Amino acid sequence: MRIIGWGAAMPERVVTNEDLAATLDTSDEWISNRTGIRSRRWGGSTSGLAAEAAGKAIDRAGTDPSTIDLTIVATCSPDMAVPATAVEVQHELGLSGAAVDVNVACSGFVHGLITAAALLDGPMDRIVVAGAETLSRLLDQSDRDTAVLFADGAGAVVVEAGSGTDGGALLASDQGNDPDARHLIRSPIGGPLAMEGRETFRRAVRVLVDSIERTLASTSFTADDVDLVVPHQANLRIIDAAAKCTSIPAERWVSIVADTGNTSAASVPMALAGAADAGRLHDGDLLLLAGFGAGMSWATALIRWDTGATA
Ligand code: ACO
């Protein structure tokens, strides 16, 4: 499979650390030092942000909407219980095919992309995969433990069946879940979201590193061969710790968390779109996408980047 288009969307309202410190017992210094977050965006709807990001990805790919076989939206903060958020995206953009949501919290987009790759090996030709969240609606905005961390946004890609060994490919993947850690991050429908931060942090570094190492070990590639890592954007300290443990140099890790906060399933496709737009990806590059989060879930994909632009 190859990723042929990408896009991202964020609500207009910027909420800085100083804005939060005006009403919460917190400070810019604490939030910046502990998380790397400086500001985040709050607002909009999950389906609206998903449609905006998916529309940009489809435009970027130059894809005819009537050739889309499936729309997948990864989200844990849908606007509605039914219909699926993907149905609203399909309606908004005039897409054909099937429409399904997946909820695996912060690892949802990578799970969705791996599923899409399997379907492109089978009956489908073209799939939209988005991650979209409005976590601000699930927050108790007076709870400093979570209000400073979570935020809203969306990212999306268009993937199509690759042309064989020369084209883009999903080279390896690793997916898993540890239900014994399911209590660490929880939200009833409508919120509020609660998290045991310290224990989540400890386990997040472990599952991220282990999953990346298992993915690489199932191939002939090593950490040296990886050109870019796009990890879930939860906390800059998690990214820094994982860079050290995996021996993939820190400059090869994409980090947007300073300006986005933790946007759960949206964070990987948002960071990927930003890296692609900034020219950080070239055809032939080895790209690692790595999600982890509530469940405790994880999903890693090793991809040969090839947009087909030079085909
Ligand atoms: N401002 C000021 N002080 C605070 C704040 C705040 N916003 N929040 C907590 N504190 C205090 C605590 O009360 C505590 O005080 P105490 O020492 O007097 O008890 C102190 O700061 C330290 O708290 P810790 O929780 O130990 O701080 P830590 O360094 O662990 O940072 C954080 C907390 C940022 C939440 C971190 O643990 C983290 O990032 N965890 C992982 C989050 C994550 O990866 N989530 C992934 C998936 S999310 C999903 O799936 C939806």
Image (spheres, rainbow, N blue to C red):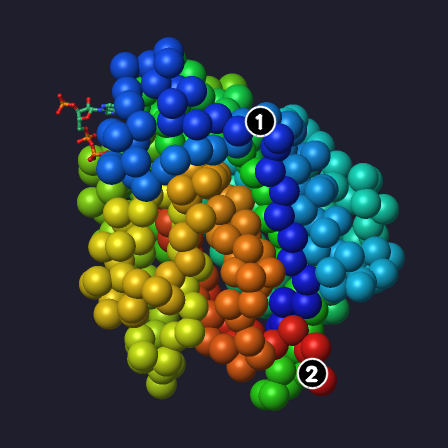
Confirm or deny contact between disc 1 and disc 2 (CB under 8 A). Answer: no
- Position of residue 144 measured from the top left corner of the image (x, y, whole percent): 32, 20
Q: Is residue 158 above or below residue 50?
A: below
Q: Residue 162's quadrant in the figure?
A: bottom right
Disc 1 element: loop
Q: CA distance from mark 1 to mark 2?
A: 39 Å
Q: Looking at mark 2, is its residue's CB closer than 8 Å to ligand 1?
A: no
Q: Is residue 138 left or right of residue 166?
A: left
- Position of residue 165 measured from the top left corner of the image (x, y, whole percent): 59, 88
The residue indicated by pointer 2 is 310
Ligand 1, what quadrant?
top left
Identity of the residue drawn at 33% across and 14% down: 24
Q: Earlier in the sequence, mark 1 or mark 2?
A: 1
Residue type at mark 1: give it: Arg
Residue type at mark 2: give it: Thr
The residue indicated by pointer 1 is 13
Disc 2 element: loop
Mark 2 closeness class: few <14, some 14–19, many ≥20 residues within 10 Å? few
Q: Residue 139's quadrant in the figure?
A: top left
Camera-side residue: 298 or 143? Answer: 143
Q: Is residue 20 above or below residue 298?
A: above
Q: What is the tally of numbered marks visible in this picture?
A: 2
